[in-house]
Amino acid sequence: MAFPVRCCALVGRFEDPRIAESVSALLPHLARRGVEVLVSEHNPPGVPGADVTRVADAELGARTDLLIAIGGDGTLLHAARLVARRAVPLLGVNRGRLGFLTDVMPQNMLQWVDAALAGELEADRRQLLTATLHQADGRHAQAFALNDVVMQKHDTGRTLDFDTRVNGRYVNTHTGDGIIVASATGSTAYALSCGGPIIEPHLEALVIAPICAHTLSDRPIVVSARSVIEIALHERPDTRANVICDGAILGSLVPGDRLETRTAGEHVTLLHPPAHDYYKILRSKLHWGRGSVER
Amino acid sequence: MAFPVRCCALVGRFEDPRIAESVSALLPHLARRGVEVLVSEHNPPGVPGADVTRVADAELGARTDLLIAIGGDGTLLHAARLVARRAVPLLGVNRGRLGFLTDVMPQNMLQWVDAALAGELEADRRQLLTATLHQADGRHAQAFALNDVVMQKHDTGRTLDFDTRVNGRYVNTHTGDGIIVASATGSTAYALSCGGPIIEPHLEALVIAPICAHTLSDRPIVVSARSVIEIALHERPDTRANVICDGAILGSLVPGDRLETRTAGEHVTLLHPPAHDYYKILRSKLHWGRGSVER
Amino acid sequence: MAFPVRCCALVGRFEDPRIAESVSALLPHLARRGVEVLVSEHNPPGVPGADVTRVADAELGARTDLLIAIGGDGTLLHAARLVARRAVPLLGVNRGRLGFLTDVMPQNMLQWVDAALAGELEADRRQLLTATLHQADGRHAQAFALNDVVMQKHDTGRTLDFDTRVNGRYVNTHTGDGIIVASATGSTAYALSCGGPIIEPHLEALVIAPICAHTLSDRPIVVSARSVIEIALHERPDTRANVICDGAILGSLVPGDRLETRTAGEHVTLLHPPAHDYYKILRSKLHWGRGSVER
Amino acid sequence: MAFPVRCCALVGRFEDPRIAESVSALLPHLARRGVEVLVSEHNPPGVPGADVTRVADAELGARTDLLIAIGGDGTLLHAARLVARRAVPLLGVNRGRLGFLTDVMPQNMLQWVDAALAGELEADRRQLLTATLHQADGRHAQAFALNDVVMQKHDTGRTLDFDTRVNGRYVNTHTGDGIIVASATGSTAYALSCGGPIIEPHLEALVIAPICAHTLSDRPIVVSARSVIEIALHERPDTRANVICDGAILGSLVPGDRLETRTAGEHVTLLHPPAHDYYKILRSKLHWGRGSVER
């Protein structure tokens, strides 16, 4: 990250009134500091404002020094993909309540944006996953994921039978709705809803969590982040699955295809306010310590 | 059920070799007893044999005295729909391992078929559910379910926000992959994979089980079988769900629609071999009592 | 319940300052209405005040027209045992946050006490359980429970092997820390922490929930409230369990003994403020509907 | 491990007939190879045979070249404590069914004992945990654990309120029956019954798993094996917990005390037959891949 910051990208659903409010405070603030503001050309003309530079997504990642994501964790996941191959740090501004990834509150936004511009915020490197979908006909598709790679049934009425392998070694044959390979960062997202554990964010580990497995003992497995995880469907009539990286569909998986997930060489850099405390965010998000069920 | 039985319907995937084997033993056995055999006209010509009567599904339910389903529990669920409005009893022959609903083993098939023809088997009445999909434009669709009515996300990348009501009273706003309303019979099917309890089959109760809920305290609720359960999606861009009854898609649910599930007036009658023991089946299916994890 | 109410029993940990504060508001209020106040003779002399009548626990249940429990759900469970054989209704005043059973908030206490004295509150009958510990030597011990009967390992290092039977029929052999038989009322207490479902309070059902079972498929079972549930330990060296009813120890269970739990003929009557809504309490206690984990 | 092996220790419950049978085959086999056999002096005189050398437990660990544990995983855990400070490898012979730690089957015992004597078996190093109980009065107690360190309520009727810290940082305040700190090795033991994940055995990670937590979102956390985990009880009347290492009681924890768990410098070395496959053992122990619940 170059200092002083000359160029800053903004990502968010600018049509959301709460986000528009934050943006309308942020734009003049950045202008006063002489920072050029980039936004994706996919926004409607004139949104979020007149004085922003509209660029293609590829150019956005290439040109910006800093990316500010305004919204929920989903917005930050989208932003992370734009800068996955770059060293651009991300600052996540939440739209009202704390996120795991977006931990700047709106009322403190300008203060921490200034600190980010000055290079004074704590940098928190998180490993990315890379998912490769090897199709039986030789084609393949690839995507990054910060949180998780999900293989899930396509037609909701039909369960999937599939095999998992770790580093080439057969693990299990599963029957159920699908499976999640989550990073430590993603362990508190979808995988948590599927019975996975919380993994502290800098542990070099992945969790493989079955989704609604038939076999009740088919429990999440935590493996080294250096593992290669392969998933393949059994041959069944009309069986088909979706592969989804951080909520975006990568493609379809059919019998004969193979989905391979591993840690990418790339990472993203999150910027945190100085008092950032992972366990405090957990306590807040999970309503811990309030004796929710008193016997 | 009229005795002596004159007419028997056969349901199954006759192209499966294991099922074909059972059928080829069963057909001459029924012929020797002078029982006419009906099959659905949806089977390929000549399948499962030359001397069977091919009829429309509606006629099959109307004409037969007994229905024999050969296969897994999924086959019996399909068969149950064919006779849901009739008093026709069902005998479930499993293709190799015990099912919750198909508890006649192939090696004992002829013995228990004879007992069924003679009216000597235990009759086990199970309540059906009825799901009604009230669409915003006034149309509606309706189906029976023996196991469960499922509302589930359609595009796998997008979670659903929805409300549940029981007897008109607001219960909860859920975020997740969907929700299951299961009968006691269906409690050991999909709902069990979603954290639901086992409900003994004759308890007049339903279980409402969220699928992969975001909120970890969003737990299954057991309510009276006399309850009316309503589900409605929140207004979100592009949100859409499937409604599935016993694995068959009933239709799509969009914001403004309402899914209503209640116990039907109709029921199905399962026939069981004399030594039928619900808990024995549970122990077998769930690998109980084998000390699977020894500390 | 006789009207007008002449006599009211107070139960609580009067040494707790928050409870003492409520009591010091309540005593003159009851005095002004000419209501005699009974407390257990187990309280220290002069506690909670000079003008209360101190009686034996047995007499307290026999003489009072109304029982006010001030504290948490644990206090109300204790109070319920005092009046289990009587028709005395219970009003539960919470000491700060809502309880499942104690749903009068301190700021509204005097209003709803007056309504209770006038017989204007909604009466909510809840079935009691009765636990009988049949010891091998012929002795037996018995207790009521509103929430649950728990059989749990005594020495924490040693797991238990035990059998369960429902209405004389063998269900399962369990290995683990113990088992809970909970009423619908108790389904949101300890059983919920052990993976049990929420059961709506007037469904005539019990839940049998294993505690930390070795076998992961050893899931909670919901059975009719008319069931008799028997638990017996396997013969093992030094094996011993505690039997606990609503948190109070009934006795020890050793191999050869038998614990029998069934619904009692007796019930308790809870009094609720008019706006009482079971699902609202659930939403509050379980932090529902706040999107606690946002993907 | 010195070769050729001159001295071998045997550990097991020799009074169990199945174990006695294995021992009576093993003793002459070792005698023919000129290997001296050590057993603990805690065995009854003459058990398991006339020609074994009876020594104190401390001497057993110091003198032996190899330890053979015959029984279940519990026997191997006990054996591991005897050699925790030594480089003595362990061979675990199961008494009938596969264990996670005891993976030599009786029918192959002599073959793999010979391979162990010859130094031909695969050595599998597993980290030990060390638990230190710092009491308020300055005393402390310490023990090793291969599987887990458990803090659990002492009197079964009373739940515990306690805090956890990781590397000095406050994590959470828990209410429940206790908490487990398990190694990767121990993740498939007690922690699995409490909702913890499976952790592959060589991942340098620990899991902190609450036992029957009141708060349903109080989920297991996976942290680095380099972490120091501290547990302290809140001040409550009569509160007291047991601390248990691999099933053996280390001592009592009361408010003011502090339990500290970390990875020990020591490790144990398990010997495995050549075809040892961790996932195969998982599949066998957890009844995976058998479609236990067929929808």
Image: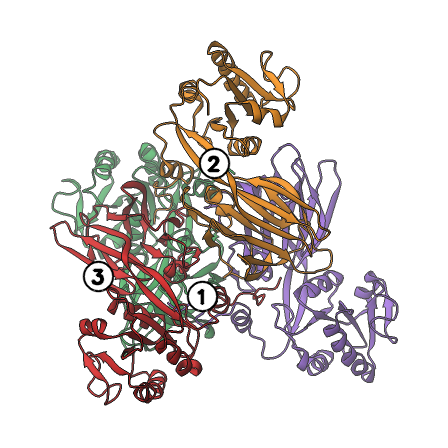
Chain colours: A purple, B orange, C red, D green
Residue D85 lies, in percent from the top left, at 32, 58
Q: Are marks 3 and 1 in contact (CB under 8 Å)?
A: no
Query: Dot 2 falls on which chain?
Result: D
Residue D209 lies, in percent from the top left, at 42, 61
Label 3 to label 1: alpha-carbon separation: 27 Å
Q: Residues within 10 Å of mark 3 (few under 14, many from 20)?
A: many
Mark 2 highlights which residue? D290
* Badge 2 amino acid: Arg
Residue B20 lies, in percent from the top left, at 55, 19
Q: Nearer the viewer, residue D118 or A25?
A: A25
Mark 1 highlights which residue? D215
Q: Residues within 10 Å of mark 2 (few under 14, many from 20)?
A: some
Q: Residues within 10 Å of mark 1 (few under 14, many from 20)?
A: many
Label 1 to label 2: alpha-carbon separation: 33 Å
- Per the image, label 1 sits on a secondary structure element best described as loop
Indicate which disc residue C29 carries.
none
* Badge 1 amino acid: Thr
